[in-house]
Structure formats: structure tokens, C-alpha cells
């Protein structure tokens, strides 16, 4: 009985102890929660806002600062421990889930959106057994000058695609990492925070393309304080279409803040696109960044212009051909150059302006030849031309009559070239006749009629081919003869002479070669000298043609040998005409036939 009574008393005693322990434990926990110090700070202006004294009270070793941004602007809030105590230094300060480091300001501040409130943004943990520890925290607010486009957190922060913020193709866009909401706090065996492991951070945007657009995204760290630590994070910019297909991907970068990150442009067709900015190695340190699509609606090229659009072949190598898209800022770039004369294509261009001074092969024919064709991405083309003029012809041989002129024109060098015979009339060169290539040559003299007697004329010839004219030949100046005919009084044979011709072999030609030889036996004929007497002298002449003989001077009688003989009893033809000179200015011809006795 006694043992049982003692056992019962012991059970009651243990239950009492346990009850006391529970009551005491609940009292400690409740007291810890009740006694934790909360300090509310409302920021409505920039500058040194408030110095907050913090003191450990009884068993309460933690003080919290709750901050509200009422400035209407995006701000940077810095927390500084101005009067740390010895006992306090056995504890810790945490700002935005990052452990405070004396002398290292990169962990001592946070960024806040307009109107944003953050509870327990700053946490001060005093030493565990120093009940008299105290300190003060200076809270300072500064405006973020590069975040002027941020209005509210909701307008700048979208952590999921479904809530993506709509942004324009152009214009600056900023976002803030607030550095508060992510992370799991680790503690040591004494319950003191030792580390924060933040989670992956994402920002989502979207934009619409009506027809076609060009984007050239850039990403820049707006605040430079944390550059030395921010490089721990690798940042990606990815752009998806509405079918979740990746259409633009930036290479991973460890951004250090020195330069703007710009990885190149892309062209997008109509549709809705989503932009994802992600730190795949976690945002160890919060930061303000700028993201700008740097885009615009596609500017098409209406065409291409060239200066010069035509060039003389002699100027090739001396002048550049400059091709320019219209408009000059078109997104439709010149992408290829084709040289018609060499048959070569260069397709490595990608520019609004192209300088081209390549030397093509020599044009084989006169005319206006396509030289270079420039082509844009969208298929617009423009062709510039080489002008290859026809050749300069030699000065023609000209024999004038009293109302006409006879021309002997040399063959041009090119078969497809024709020749224009030109006469200067009233100060203007007029084409009197055009000859084809095969109408030229010394065996094909050409006569121009309609000239006035005893008049000076200037003549020239000019090659013409494929719409191109050559440099005119040197000018020939000639005078037409008198239109008066000589009046014949008499023609008498005054001398005869026998002429013996030796025999010879006559060649017969077929197709440019000798087909056979024929023997011509020797023979004799009579050569005659005649005297032509005029009724009177013909004025304004330089001489007389008599039986193909040129006799200088204006006379009443002329005695000449007739070049062709005649057998006895046959007719002898005598042709007589006036002339200004031996080869020009011929007058009307008189033909007389006499009998050779």
C-alpha cells in the first residue's frame, strides 16, 4: 500500500511538472511573439528620412522595420547601422534577406515601387545574452533616375506569362528586383540566420506586331552598385510567338554592367509575342534593369536609286556607282550586286548604301548596256548602265558636183554599226543619209543630192549602233561647181598613135580563188589626141575635164589624149565638164560622139 501510494504521488508530481513546463513554454512563446519590436516607417520624401533607435527589451532579441513608399516614385532605400554597440555586434542585421556587411554597401539597400509596402524589410538580431544592447538604423531614400517609367509594381512586374505586361515596340522599359519575397532562410544551431537561397526570378512582357517589325532588344543594368556581385547571375532574354515557339534567343551572359548588352536584331511577322527575362542562376542580389525592344514597324524599300545611273565606259574605274535604298532608313536592305558584264554576283551585302567601283569586262558592242543590278531583301531592284558609244569613223572622201556630193565611206569596225552622213545647214548638223554596214566601202560611193551650185559645204560622218552615236569624224569642207554647161564649138582629131598590147594570161576567179587561166593574144589599137574648142570661156571654174583628163584653167580650147582608143571607122566618145578642182566642184557634163577616121 505504501509503495502504491508513493507511486501515485510520484505520478501526480510528474504530471504537475509537465503541466508547469507546458504553461511556461506557452508563456515564453507568446511573450516572444508579443514582445518582438515592430517599427513602422512611412517614406514620403527623399533624403535622410529617419533615424530609428533599436533596443533589446527583456528577452526580445529581434527588432523589425516595416517600410512604406509614399513618394509616388521608384526609390532606393538604404539602411545604415550608425551606432553599433559591442553587445549588438554579437548579433546580425539583415536587409532584404541579405546579410548586412559593414563597409560593403551592396547588401544594405533595397528597391521599392511607388506605393509599395514591405514588412520586416530590415531585421536586427541582438546578442542572445546581452539584455542592454542597443543601436540605431538610419533610413535614407533616393529617387531612381533611370526608373522614371515605373508607375506601380503591377505595371512593372509580371512573374508569369499569363500576366505578361504589354510593352510598345519602342520606348524604355524598366523593372525592379525587390529582393524580398524569394528565398529560404537557413539558421545555425543557435537559431541565427546564416544564408539565403533565393529562387529563380522571371519577368514577362508581351507585344503585338501588326504586319512586320524589326526588334533589336537591349538589356542594361541601371544601378551600378552591385555590378561586382550581379555577375553571379546568368541572364537570358527569350522571345516566343503565340504558339510557344522560340523565335529569338539571346546567348547567356554574365552581365557586369560595363556596356549595354546588345546581341543583334530580328525581323518578326504579324502576331503576339512574349518576352521572358530570366536569371537561371538566381538573383543573388536585387537590381534595377532596363529592357528595351528597340523596335519599330518594318520600313519597306520603295526602290533603289543610283548615282550615277549611267556611266561612260571610259569612266569605269574612275567613278563609283553609289546605290541607296528609298527611303534611306529602310529595313529592306541591299543584299546582292550583279555585274552583267562580268556575269558575277556578290550576295554578302546587307546595307542601305552600297559603293561599287568594280571594273567589268570590255563591252563588245556599242550601245547602252546593263551593268549593275542591285537587289533588296524584299526583291526591289535597280539597274545602272554603261554607255559604250560607237566608234569614231575616218574622214570620208568627198567629190562635189554642182548640185550634189559623192561620198566614199570606210567600213566601221563593228558589223552592227551604221553610218550617218551629215551636212551642216544653218548652223545645225543634219543627217542627209544613213548607210548600213554593207553599203560602205570604196566600191559603194553614195550620192547626196539637193545642194546649191558654187556654195561651200561642211560634211562629216558619224557611227550609230544600238541607240549610241560615236564621236563625229573630222570635218570635210567642199564647194559645189558651176551649173553652166560648156558650149562646144568643135572637136577635132589632131594626132593618132598606134599602140601595141602584149598578150597575157587572164585569171578567172570563183569563190575567192583562181579557177582557171585564159590566154589573151596581143593586139593593137589607135590612140587619138583631140582638140576641143568652146564658143566662149566658162566663168567661175578652176579647169575642165576633157575625156577623163583634167586641164587646169578657164580656156577657150583644150587639147588632150583620149584614154581609150578606137578602131578605124568606129565612134569615139568625148565627155566634157567644168570643175573647181581636180576632184571636186564638177559641173554638168556634155557628151559628144565623133567618128575616128
Image (spheres, rainbow, N blue to C red):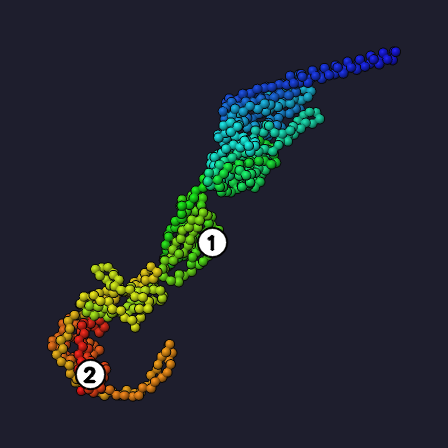
Task: Name the residue beneath numbered marker 1.
Answer: 346
* Foreground: disc 1 or disc 2: 2
**Circle 1 sits in a helix, a strand or a loop, which is it?**
strand
- Viewer-proximal residue, 540 or 369? 369
Q: Quadrant of residue 341?
A: bottom left
Q: Residue at x 84, y 14 (%)?
A: 7
Task: Classify 436 as above or below 187.
Answer: below
Task: Classify 64 as above or below 279.
Answer: above
Q: Position of residue 197 (x, y in %)?
A: 64, 31
Give how far apart the Cα atoms at labels 1 and 2 are: 80 Å
Looking at this view, name the residue that lies furthest to the front: 243
Task: Classify 133 as above or below 528.
Answer: above
* Drawn side of residue 553 relative to residue 80, left or right: left
Q: Residue at x 50, y 23 (%)?
A: 71
Q: Quadrant of residue 161?
A: top right
Q: Residue at x 74, y 14 (%)?
A: 20
* Drawn side of residue 358 relative to residue 126, left or right: left
* Drawn side of residue 117 relative to residue 326, left or right: right
Task: Classify 2 as above or below 281.
Answer: above
Task: Name the residue beneath numbered marker 2.
Answer: 571
Q: Position of residue 124 (x, y in %)?
A: 62, 23
Q: Position of residue 204 (x, y in %)?
A: 54, 34
- Determine if residue 135 is in view: no
Q: Position of residue 209 (x, y in %)?
A: 48, 38
Looking at this view, name the residue that lies furthest to the left: 535
- Viewer-proximal residue, 184 or 590? 590
**Circle 2 sits in a helix, a strand or a loop, which is it?**
strand
Tell me which label, 1 or 2, sits earlier in the chain. Answer: 1
Crowding around mark 1 (Cα neighbors within 10 Å: few <14, some 14 to 19, many 20+) is: few
Which quadrant does the N terminus fall into? top right
Amino acid at each position: 500500500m505504501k509503495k502504491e501510494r508513493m507511486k501515485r504521488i510520484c505520478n501526480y508530481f510528474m504530471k504537475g511538472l509537465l503541466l508547469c513546463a507546458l504553461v511556461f513554454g506557452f508563456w515564453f512563446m507568446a511573450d516572444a511573439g508579443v514582445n518582438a519590436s515592430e517599427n513602422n516607417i512611412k517614406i514620403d520624401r527623399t533624403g535622410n528620412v529617419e533615424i530609428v533607435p533599436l533596443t533589446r527589451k527583456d528577452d526580445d532579441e529581434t527588432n523589425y522595420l516595416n517600410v512604406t513608399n509614399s513618394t509616388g516614385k521608384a526609390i532606393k532605400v538604404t539602411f545604415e547601422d550608425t551606432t553599433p554597440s559591442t553587445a549588438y555586434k554579437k548579433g546580425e542585421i539583415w536587409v532584404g534577406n541579405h546579410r548586412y556587411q559593414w563597409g560593403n554597401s551592396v547588401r544594405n539597400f533595397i528597391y521599392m515601387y511607388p506605393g509599395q509596402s514591405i514588412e520586416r524589410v530590415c531585421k536586427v538580431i541582438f546578442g542572445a545574452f546581452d539584455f542592454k544592447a542597443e543601436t540605431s538604423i538610419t533610413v535614407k531614400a533616393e529617387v531612381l533616375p533611370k526608373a522614371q517609367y515605373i508607375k506601380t509594381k503591377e505595371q512593372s512586374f509580371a512573374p508569369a506569362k499569363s500576366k505578361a505586361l504589354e510593352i510598345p515596340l519602342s520606348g524604355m522599359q524598366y523593372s525592379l528586383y525587390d529582393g524580398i519575397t524569394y528565398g529560404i532562410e537557413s539558421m545555425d544551431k543557435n537559431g541565427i540566420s546564416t544564408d539565403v537561397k533565393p529562387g529563380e526570378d522571371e519577368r514577362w512582357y508581351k507585344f503585338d506586331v501588326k504586319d512586320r517589325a524589326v526588334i533589336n532588344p537591349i538589356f542594361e543594368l541601371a544601378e551600378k552598385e552591385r555590378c561586382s556581385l550581379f555577375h553571379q547571375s546568368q541572364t537570358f532574354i527569350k522571345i516566343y510567338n503565340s504558339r510557344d515557339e522560340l523565335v529569338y534567343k539571346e546567348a547567356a551572359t554574365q552581365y557586369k554592367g560595363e556596356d549595354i548588352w546588345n546581341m543583334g536584331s530580328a525581323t518578326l511577322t504579324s502576331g503576339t509575342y512574349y518576352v521572358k527575362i530570366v536569371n537561371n542562376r538566381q538573383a543573388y542580389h536585387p537590381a534595377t534593369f532596363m529592357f528595351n525592344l528597340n523596335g519599330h514597324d518594318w520600313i519597306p524599300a520603295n526602290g533603289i536609286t543610283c548615282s550615277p545611273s549611267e556611266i561612260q565606259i571610259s569612266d569605269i574605274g574612275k567613278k563609283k556607282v553609289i546605290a541607296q535604298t528609298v527611303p534611306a532608313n529602310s529595313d529592306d536592305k541591299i543584299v546582292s550586286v550583279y555585274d552583267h558584264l562580268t556575269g558575277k554576283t556578290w550576295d554578302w551585302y546587307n546595307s542601305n548604301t552600297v559603293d561599287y567601283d568594280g571594273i567589268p569586262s570590255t563591252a563588245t558592242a556599242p550601245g547602252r548596256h546593263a551593268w549593275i543590278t542591285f537587289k533588296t531583301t524584299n526583291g526591289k531592284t535597280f539597274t545602272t548602265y554603261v554607255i559604250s558609244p560607237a566608234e569614231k569613223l575616218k574622214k570620208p572622201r568627198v567629190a562635189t558636183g554642182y548640185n550634189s556630193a559623192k561620198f566614199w565611206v570606210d567600213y566601221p569596225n563593228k558589223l552592227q554599226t551604221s553610218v550617218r552622213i551629215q551636212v551642216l545647214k544653218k548652223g545645225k548638223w543634219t543627217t542627209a543619209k544613213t548607210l548600213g554596214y554593207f553599203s560602205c566601202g570604196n566600191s559603194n560611193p553614195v550620192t547626196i543630192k539637193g545642194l546649191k551650185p558654187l556654195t561651200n559645204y561642211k560634211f562629216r560622218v558619224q557611227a550609230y549602233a544600238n541607240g549610241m552615236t560615236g564621236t563625229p569624224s573630222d570635218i570635210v569642207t567642199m564647194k559645189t561647181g558651176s551649173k553652166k554647161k560648156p558650149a562646144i564649138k568643135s572637136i577635132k582629131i589632131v594626132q593618132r598613135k598606134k599602140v601595141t598590147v602584149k598578150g597575157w594570161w587572164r585569171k578567172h576567179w570563183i569563190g575567192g580563188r583562181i579557177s582557171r587561166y585564159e590566154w589573151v593574144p596581143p593586139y593593137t589599137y589607135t590612140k587619138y589626141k583631140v582638140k576641143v574648142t568652146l564658143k566662149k570661156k566658162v566663168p567661175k571654174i578652176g579647169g575642165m575635164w576633157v575625156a577623163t583628163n583634167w586641164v587646169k584653167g578657164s580656156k577657150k580650147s583644150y587639147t588632150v589624149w583620149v584614154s581609150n582608143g578606137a578602131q578605124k571607122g568606129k565612134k569615139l566618145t568625148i565627155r566634157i565638164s567644168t570643175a573647181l578642182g581636180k576632184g571636186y566642184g564638177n559641173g554638168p557634163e556634155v557628151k559628144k560622139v565623133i567618128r575616128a577616121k
